[in-house]
Image: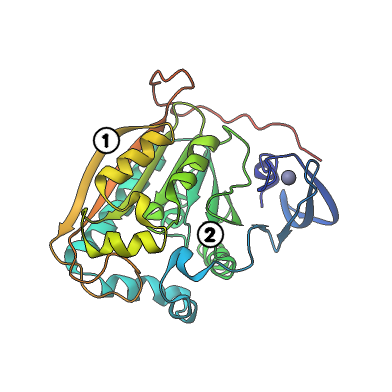
């Protein structure tokens, strides 16, 4: 966890300031080990081996996938290849296109950027190599073992110098209000239960006018997928009207909405719990931005340096 980034951390439960307690270990501008204590509600959080821990030790199975065992058993380097091989060719192209588009968006930004649903680091790997000079990235994901694997892989590929990682519960981010100049998510909205509340967190940490750019996997209304999703609390962003309503509800204005791939029948796929086999699907790439408190749209802020508040403790 880069110390500069640790300064914008707050309590994941109440948003209060954090004090750092011993044992505290710093190496080259990074916090490696620390116990963090909320000054308001006394909740305890931690940094272990450089990764912030702000959630449950393991995600609930349906937070992310139908078979967490399958995911955990797949080695990091094989996971992506195996996943792409399970997709229909149109969806595989859509995923690649989404990655390229997210990469393009991130390259136009600077300051503190949040990558939600970091997983194996698909987005971070693309944007932290040569040419990335000004951004600092916070990768958030609920899966702690996966984050440690991603940390090791990013280090090996020399993509870690501007990255900090933290395990979180999707609807409770340990970041201060208006601390981020951009949030990106590679298919995050497709896998978060109670996604409207989650999107409220996105809006809360964004500075007004700053962008939220994400890809998402959708289906249509009145499908079996939507009925099944409701049982899993995953239905709030699963169709275009629902996703648009969730953004609106969270104070996010849509700037562009692009369908990058679609098909009439989703094939069986052991990695994605939804859509269900046989239902129509589409991949979308959406660029939105946080509305100002008075509701007036604001220009997207580009290339403006982030000012970090002073250390909390
Ligand atoms: Zn607190």
Q: Earlier in the sequence, mark 1 or mark 2?
A: 2
Does residue 7 show up?
yes
The x and y percentages for residue 55 are: 63, 58
Q: Secondary structure at mark 2?
A: loop
Name the side, left or right, on which 145 lies relative to 126.
right
Query: Badge 1: how crowded within 10 Å, few (<14), some, or many (20+)?
Result: few
Q: Is residue 131 visible?
A: no
Mark 2 residue crowding within 10 angstroms, few (<14) / some (14–19) / many (20+): some
Q: CA distance from mark 1 to mark 2?
A: 33 Å
Q: Is residue 58 left or right of residue 13?
A: left
Q: Residue at the spot x=39%, y=22% of the render?
A: 299
Q: Is residue 172 left or right of residue 30?
A: left
Question: Which of the two residues, 26 or 90, is positioned nearer the viewer here?
Answer: 90
* Label 2 within 8 A of ligand 1 by Cβ: no
- Badge 1 element: strand
Ligand 1 has an atom within 8 Å of the beta carbon of the residue at disc 1: no
Residue farthest toward the left in the current orientation of the protein = 264
Compare residues 97 and 39 and report the one nearer the observer. Answer: 39
Q: Nearer the viewer, mark 1 or mark 2?
A: 1
Picture quadrant where residue 3 is located: top right
The residue labelled by disc 2 is 158
Tell me which residue sits at (49%, 71%) in the image.
61
Quadrant for the C terminus in the image: top right
Identify the residue position indicated by label 1 in the image: 256
Picture coordinates of residue 175 (x, y %)? Answer: 62, 42
Q: Nearer the viewer, residue 18 or 274?
A: 274
Q: Is residue 252 left or right of residue 25?
A: left
**Residue 216 higher or lower than 7, as above or below:** below
Dividing the image into four quarters, tell me where ligand 1 lies: top right
The percent position of residue 54, horizontal first and vertical second, equals 65, 55
State the residue at coordinates (21%, 50%): 260
């Amino acid at each position: 966890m880069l110390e500069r980034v640790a300064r914008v951390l707050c309590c994941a439960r109440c948003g209060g300031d954090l004090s750092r307690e011993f044992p505290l270990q710093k190496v080259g501008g990074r916090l490696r080990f620390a116990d963090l204590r909320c000054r308001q509600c006394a909740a305890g959080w931690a940094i272990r081996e450089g990764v912030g821990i702000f959630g449950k030790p393991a995600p609930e199975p349906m937070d992310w996938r139908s078979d967490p065992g399958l995911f955990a058993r797949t080695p990091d380097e094989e996971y992506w290849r195996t996943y792409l091989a399970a997709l229909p060719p149109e969806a595989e192209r859509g995923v690649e296109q989404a990655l390229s588009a997210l990469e393009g968006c991130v390259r136009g930004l600077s300051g503190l950027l949040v990558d939600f649903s970091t997983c194996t680091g698909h987005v971070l790997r693309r944007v932290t190599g040569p040419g990335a000079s000004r951004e600092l990235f916070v990768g958030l994901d609920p899966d702690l073992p996966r984050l440690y694997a991603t940390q090791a892989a990013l280090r090996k590929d020399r993509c870690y110098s501007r990255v900090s990682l933290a395990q979180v519960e999707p609807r409770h981010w340990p970041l201060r209000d208006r601390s981020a100049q951009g949030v990106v998510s590679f298919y995050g909205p497709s896998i978060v239960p109670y996604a409207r509340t989650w999107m409220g967190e996105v809006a809360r940490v964004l500075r007004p006018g700053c962008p939220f750019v994400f890809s998402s996997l959708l289906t249509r209304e009145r499908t079996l997928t939507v009925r099944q999703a409701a049982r899993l609390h995953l239905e709030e962003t699963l169709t275009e009207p629902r996703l648009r309503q969730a953004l609106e509800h969270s104070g996010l204005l849509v700037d562009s909405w692009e369908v990058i791939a679609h098909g009439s029948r989703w094939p069986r796929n052991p990695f994605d719990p939804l859509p269900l086999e046989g239902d129509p699907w589409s991949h979308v790439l959406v660029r939105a931005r946080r509305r100002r408190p008075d509701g007036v749209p604001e220009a997207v802020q580009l290339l403006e340096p982030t000012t970090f508040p002073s250390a909390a403790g």
